[in-house]
Image: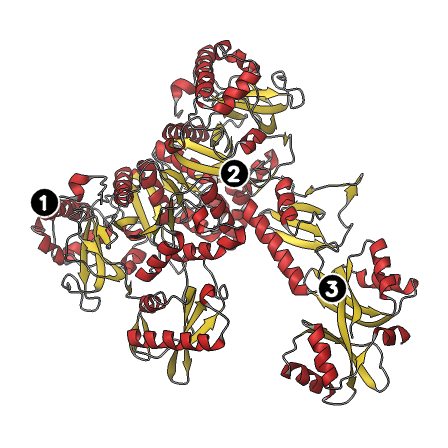
Amino acid sequence: MKITQISVFLENRKGRLCDVCSLLGSAGINIRALTIAETESFGVLRIVVDKPDKAIDMFKKQNITANKTDVVAVEVPDQPGGLARVLKILSDNDVNVEYMYGFVEKFSKNALLVFRFDDAIRANKVLAENNIPIVTADDISGL
Amino acid sequence: MIWNEKIETMPLADLKNLQSQRLASLVGYVYKNCPIYKQKLDQAGVATSDIKSIDDITKLPFTTKLDMRDNYPFGLFSRPRTELVEIHVSSGTTGNPTLVGYTRDDIKLWSDVMARCLCCAGAEPDDTIQIAYGYGLFTGGLGFHYGALEMGLTIIPTSSGQTKRQLKIMQDFAPRILACTPSYCLYMAEEAKEMGIDPRQASWKIGIFGAEPWSESMRTEIEQTWNMLATDVYGLSEIIGPGVSQECRHKQGLHIFSDVFYPEIIDPDTGKPVPEGGDGELVITTLTKQGIPLLRYRTRDIVSMTTAPCKCGRTSPRTSKIKGRTDDMIVVRGINVFPSQIEHVLLGIDGTHPHYQIVIDRQAHQLDTVDIMVEVDEKIFSDEIKKMHALEQKIKKEIEAMLSIGVEVKLVEPKTIARSEGKAKRVIDKRAL
Amino acid sequence: MDTPFWNKEIETLPRKQLEQLQLERLKALVAQAFKTAFYSKRLKRAGINSPDDIKSLADMHKIPFTVKDDLRQNYPFGLLAVPMEQVVRIHSSSGTTGIPTVIYLTADDLNNWTDLIARCLVATGATSKDVFQNMMSYGLFTGGLGLHYGAEKIGMTVIPVGGGNTQRQIQLMKDFKTSVLHITPSYLLHIHHRLPEFNVKPSDLHIKKAFLGAEPYSENTRKKLEHLFGIDAYNSYGLSEMNGPGVAFECVYKNDLHVWEDAYILEIIDPVAGTPVPDGQQGEVVLTNLVRNAMPLMRYRTRDLAFVHTDPCPCGRTHRRLSRILGRTDDMLIVGGVNVFPSQIEEVLMSIPEVGNNYQIHLSRAGDLDKLTVKVEIYSKLFTGDLSQLDVLKSKIKDRLRASITINPHIELHEPGALPAFEGKAKRVIDEREKL
């Protein structure tokens, strides 16, 4: 089960992150998870929001470069070794993780993690076979 | 000393006769040997017998950079390719470079005019010259090389770059003449100070600077920093390379070797001559070149010209320093850059046509820098940093391959490049020349 | 086969007359050498007080060797034999470490050199109809300007492009139907690797010949390049101390390099003992430049290893042939006490078709033991994706190398393009062992 992540191109300039977050806030869009990958001159802001389509439309109107990427959100037991177990299953099954980051809030008793896989279909299958809970888009918008 | 005294000090009336004879035979020559010129002359309704005097030159059609590009590579040749002994190329406005081809006689001509330049700047046959213009396809290095060889100077062909080695060679061999771009000369002063060398004690006493526009204030700075005479040399590869004109020690404009490169100053809009002393586009006819002779080639450089006598005794007219361009060409570290070249590269990247801007800058006594700002839109944006880096690198590499100079590429957000009336300003030149 | 000549009389001069000419020129050279601060002292110390002390070519053994260090210690003017105003050209070696080595040429010296290069080019069959793309650096480096002058002399159309900028190189080859290249072998391999990027096939180009020089390479590398581009590749030999290229070149028969013995006296010596070795046996190349007035250099130890052929060449030239450079006295590697030349490794690698264009020799130390690792790019067209095939290739390379160099290397296979590429001289040996 895939969910939509929005990636936003940002220059490394003061206040750019604040601008983007304020826009989301004033449009009533809630950020569920967030990470920034940065380089010397620019960065890519990756967010999971409750209303992704609305967010994309708004960015377009504001001339902000953004696109959608499919990611997988996974429930991981919030205890020592919880993440390691999931990663080991993935690695044993030759699934490659491009990048990953944590959720802003907890989901029941578990931690939520967002994964970007090179092969999302295979990843989903491996996770399901190993009974690792996957979060749906509906779960996200209901958070 | 004057290298070719008979020609360079020839009374103007005699010079005009010589020019007239040469022009008449040139027109006959290109009509016979170059199909493109035959067509151009026929279209303009000019018969070769119409050209009797140099004053008839205005009857001839212009040749432009576009003619060079459209007929690339061999169209404007007047000799079979096998008679060319050397080919150079310079940057064209888009994909194709501009071709320069020399026959053996053309190389002799080039050697002669470059020897004239060296003498005009004050070189003596016993001198040693350090040639720090780039060697290779760029005409600067080999042009000076041929002239210095013709004059019998001792040549140190250092080529460009490797500043520490340049300075070490200056100290070890005490060359009195330096040939390089003016900005590089100032840059070397900084490096010299770092190496504990006092520029005012340097062996260089005469500098021959060109390949990029520079101002009187830059001249003053070079002369004071290095304690040398700084002279200006002009040329363009389409005509011959360096060697079209050169300042003498009086520094009252550049003597143009009009017995071989006939100059006109025209209004770039109407194509009509401008009165003596007025600013206009420099147009040159190569009166004696064999391989690729050009009729009324529009250089796109804005200058003024005077025929007033000079104290040095040379009679040929003098042009001012370059005052501007009729097109958007910029010169960076001696290399001609057209914004259209960068556009051409960007268009080739995934077929997109992103907005861009070229920022040229020069920190005090440093080499010129070129930043290419490219706006990132959805078509080229990727979520993956490594893909974005790869894009940045690809643009950088392709632009560098096209321009032959290093650039930095910066990816920027949409609409951050200022637009005026919907059209982006493509070039921001922050240099104080 | 037709044998073209630039100067037939000199190139086919009977040995006896050639040696007579050498002797005359050697005497004149000794006279010239006395004008330098360096040689006047050194010759006298060796008991040579005037050119008359050289009565036969055998007497030249009295002249002491000159080594690179002599040039450095006498920098900049110690070997200069003419007043500076007669010098028209100065070249200098890269001088990346310490003091550069410098050579001086008068106008006559430059003419002599140019004439030798013209000889080289004509010997390969190059003519004024050829378009010559000169891809060696111009400037203080002698490779670019050296061939430039010679090519211009025989009337070729010269494109003085210098090294680097692969995209433009390929465009020029296409646009001007370049027929002859001057290039380092590693760069030509790199160009081949890059052609598909620009949608160009070797058959789209018009190259007929390549002059390969400025770095050592094997016969198999030559064959590979000839096959990849469908060209004839010729070996070129020279060194900046001897003016640069033009010391020796292959003729149309491509069976090693004629040394222009009217201009250079060639000796091959045992690098340790300093004594002559018999023809056919490998040793250090020692050269004396007979036709340079500005800067005489006698019995100069090149540190290049090669041998001299004993059989005549079908082309009719009487000038003896030098083998390709088999190594350097100073790049000999000592691995676990065994002498290994990188050229031996290259020879083996290039004889294996599954090996690609690029390789690297890596030396490290594990405990007390030297470890030799050879990193090899595989040739993608012959790789089917079967992993067991790679293991077979690995042991094949290993076995053949062990047979040649007598030590056991580690082999690493890499994807095509994974090892660093070079747009000039290749750096193939990485020695990470601590200096003892």
Q: Chain of mark 3?
A: A
Question: For the residue marked with disc 3, what is the amino acid?
Answer: Val
* Element on which disc 2 rests: strand
Distance between mark 1 and mark 2 Cα atoms:
50 Å
Q: Estimate how packed mark 3 is, as few (under 14), some (14 to 19) or many (20 or more) residues with alpha carbons within 10 Å.
A: many
Same-chain check, marks 3 and 2: no
Residue B96 versus residue C52 in the image, above or below: above
Looking at the image, which residue is at 21% across and 61% down? Answer: C307
Q: Nearer the viewer, residue A11 or C273?
A: A11
Disc 1 designates what residue? C17
Quarter-of-image position of residue C281: bottom left
Residue designated by label 3 = A44
**Which chain letter matches label 2?**
B
Judge from the rendering whether residue B212 lies leftward or rightward of residue C346; answer left or right. Answer: right
Disc 1 residue type (three-letter): Gln
Picture quadrant where residue C407 is located:
bottom left
Q: How crowded is the residue under tag 1: few (<14 C-alpha within 10 Å), some, or many (20+)?
A: few
Q: Residue at 52% x, 43% y: name it.
A: B185
In terms of depth relative to the viewer, which is nearer, B166 or B275?
Answer: B275
How far apart are the alpha carbons under marks 3 and 2?
39 Å
Q: Nearer the viewer, residue B347 or B296?
A: B347
For this orientation, the residue located farthest to the bottom is: A80
Disc 2 designates what residue?
Answer: B90
Quarter where residue B411 is shown: bottom right
- Residue A96: x %, y % from top left: 65, 75
Q: Amino acid at mark 2?
A: Ser
For the N terminus of chain B, the image quarter is top left
